[in-house]
Amino acid sequence: MASSFEQMRANVGKLLRGIDRYNPENLATLERYVETQVKENAYDLEANLAILKLYQFNPAYFQVTVTSQILLKALTNLPHTDFTLCKCMIDQTHQEERPIRQILYLGNLLETCHFQSFWSSLEENREFIDGITGFEDSVRKYTQVKVWMSKYGWTENEEGQIFIFNQEESVKPKNIVEKIDFESVSSIMATSQ
């Protein structure tokens, strides 16, 4: 089955090169590609952004279900900025529609590390992630990394690399105090003269 996704990825890759990228007749193929990503736990940001761009140019073709799937797939790629990119390409009026509004709320909870609220809100809206293979596992990985980062002071740079805070960077000096009485030192001092 992975070979069918790879074949579809190659075909979509050809579609996205050149002027055909903005041809609304290709929307059906691109939307089927999103379905394949959802079922096979795959992800292609470039193709998903192309769909959202086509929806901007052709508002009559806008599909709430496909847009919701694109947003949910972008959430599986956190901590990368894919979710924000996708969100910015959706018209404000469409952002107010029911499933999209809740998904944007879930994304906000994740990005601001309100994990308990995220999981309880997700539980109330299970229908959003039905059929999205690997969604919960991907989010769980992200939340675990964020918890470890805050617990141990790890940092992330612009390229998404995480720098682990190690012991050598936080060495604290320790004062060692020894109690030696004068009589034991006086004998040593007398022999050294």
Image (cartoon, rainbow, N blue to C red):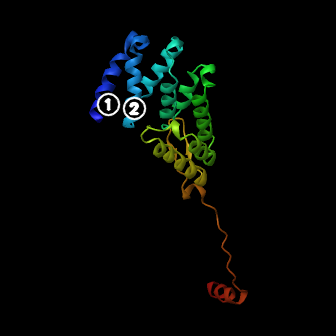
Q: Quadrant of residue 117?
A: top right
Pick the front one: 128 or 161: 128
Residue beneath the point at 52% across and 24% down:
64
Count of residue discs:
2
User: To which residue does mark 2 refer?
Assistant: 37
Residue beneath the point at 41% across and 27% down:
34
Of labels 2 and 1, earlier in sequence is 1
Pick the front one: 65 or 7: 65
Q: Is mark 2 on a helix, strand or loop?
A: helix
Above or below 117: residue 21? above
Pick the front one: 146 or 94: 94
Above or below 174: residue 169? above
Above or below 26: residue 97? below
Left or right of 82 in this view: 42: left
Above or below 138: residue 81? above
Left or right of 9 in this view: 180: right
Answer whether residue 79 is visible to the viewer in this image.
no
Give the CA distance from mark 2 to mark 1. 8 Å
Would you say the residues marked 2 and 1 are in contact, meaning their CB atoms lie under 8 Å apart? Answer: yes
Q: Callout 1, which amino acid?
A: Phe
- Image spot of residue 4 (x, y percent): 28, 30
- Image spot of residue 112 (x, y percent): 63, 40
Q: Is mark 1 on a helix, strand or loop?
A: helix
Q: Quadrant of the C terminus?
A: bottom right
- Image spot of residue 21 (x, y percent): 41, 14
Q: Callout 2, which amino acid?
A: Gln
User: To which residue does mark 1 refer?
Assistant: 5
Q: In which quarter of the image is residue 39?
A: top left
Pick the front one: 187 or 59: 59
Answer whether residue 29 is visible to the viewer in this image.
yes
